[in-house]
């Protein structure tokens, strides 16, 4: 079998055709319109800085009834929030003197302090004085003192007992009184607190403010 040898001229012509095709493609690329570049959307605005004057409620804050609130001990960060409540009074259930910063806030905003010093012991059934709870309830239920805030240190035990006795005046059943107490005391709930509320006699206070009881 005899192989056909491509003449030199034909090889040269083939190379010239390939080169022409490459040049033709290059020319076409040069005359093509440049790709359209889409403009990017403007950057999103930066998130607003944290508002240092935000309303921050105290620990364990909650509404008890119209014009009656409860919480743990208010810090300076809570003052703006308390101011928004337009409080007339604070019922303070600890024996320690009220801090100067808090006292200045009360004076500046015309808020009256009612202090009923109850020791924060682990046996509140023994140490919560029945007469102080009664006097505190009279303040709480007097419309002239409302809106008001009840607080102790953490807003759990002393505050919980006072609110529990108020609920008895409002004719709540004991199971509901204890359920509310447990929501705030949680793992720190004390059987002795519940015993105190169960035995507390509200008969001498039933004449107070029928709007709440």
Image: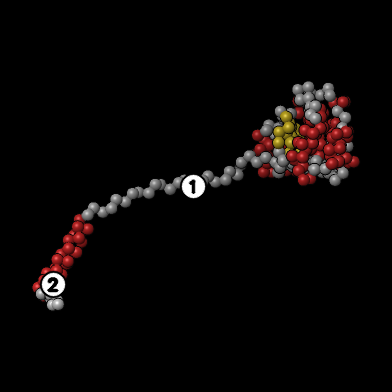
Q: Residue 197 sits in which quadrant?
A: top right
Residue at 33% in and 49% down:
38
Circle 1: is it few (<14), some (14-19), or many (20+) Cα within 10 Å? few
- Across and down, in percent, residue 56 comes to 65, 41
The structure residue drawn at horizontal position 76% and vertical position 36%, both measured from the top left corner, is 180
Indicate left or right for 26 with 211 as reference: left
Q: Secondary structure at mark 1?
A: loop
The reply to whether residue 196 is in sight is yes
Mark positioned earlier in the residue sequence (1 or 2): 2
Residue on which the image places disc 1: 46
Q: Residue at x 74, y 39 (%)?
A: 183
Is residue 70 depicted above or below 6 in this figure? above
Q: Nearer the viewer, residue 74 or 33?
A: 33
Q: CA distance from mark 1 to mark 2?
A: 68 Å
Q: Quadrant of the N terminus?
A: bottom left
Q: Does 25 appear above or below 175?
A: below
Image coordinates of residue 73 in percent, x first then y, are 74, 42
Residue 30: where, in percent of width, then height?
Answer: 21, 58
Q: Is residue 201 above or below residue 187?
A: above
Say the numbered circle drawn on residue 164. Answer: none
Crowd around label 2: few <14 · some 14–19 · many ≥20 (10 Å)? few
Question: Which residue lies at the image location 77% right of the left edge and 42% below the top edge?
Answer: 185
Occupied quadrant, residue 34: bottom left
Across and down, in percent, residue 81 comes to 66, 38
Q: Secondary structure at mark 2?
A: helix
Foreground: disc 1 or disc 2: 2
Quadrant assignment for the C terminus: top right
Answer whether labels 1 and 2 touch (C-beta < 8 Å).
no
Q: Nearer the viewer, residue 109 or 37?
A: 37
From the viewer's perspective, tell me whether residue 205 is left or right of residue 100: right
Q: Which mark is residue 11?
A: 2
Q: Could one spot residue 114 in this view of the protein?
A: no
């Amino acid at each position: 079998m005899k192989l056909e040898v491509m003449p030199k001229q034909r090889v040269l012509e083939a190379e010239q055709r390939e080169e022409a095709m490459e040049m033709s493609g290059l020319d076409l690329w040069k005359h093509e319109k440049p790709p359209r570049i889409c403009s990017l959307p403007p950057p999103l605005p930066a998130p607003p800085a944290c508002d240092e004057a935000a309303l921050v409620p105290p620990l364990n804050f909650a509404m008890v009834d119209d014009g009656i609130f409860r919480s743990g001990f208010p810090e300076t960060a809570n003052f703006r929030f308390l101011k928004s409540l337009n409080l007339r009074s604070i019922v303070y259930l600890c024996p320690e003197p009220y801090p100067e910063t808090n006292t200045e806030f009360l004076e500046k905003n015309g808020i009256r302090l009612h202090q009923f010093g109850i020791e924060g012991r682990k046996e509140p059934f023994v140490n919560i004085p029945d007469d102080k709870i009664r006097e505190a309830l009279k303040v709480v239920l007097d419309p002239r003192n409302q809106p008001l805030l009840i607080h102790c240190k953490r807003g759990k035990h002393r505050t919980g007992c006072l609110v529990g006795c108020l609920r008895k005046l409002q004719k709540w059943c004991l199971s509901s009184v204890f359920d509310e107490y447990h929501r705030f005391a949680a793992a720190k709930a004390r059987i002795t607190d519940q015993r105190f509320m169960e035995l507390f006699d509200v008969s001498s206070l039933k004449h107070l403010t029928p709007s709440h009881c």
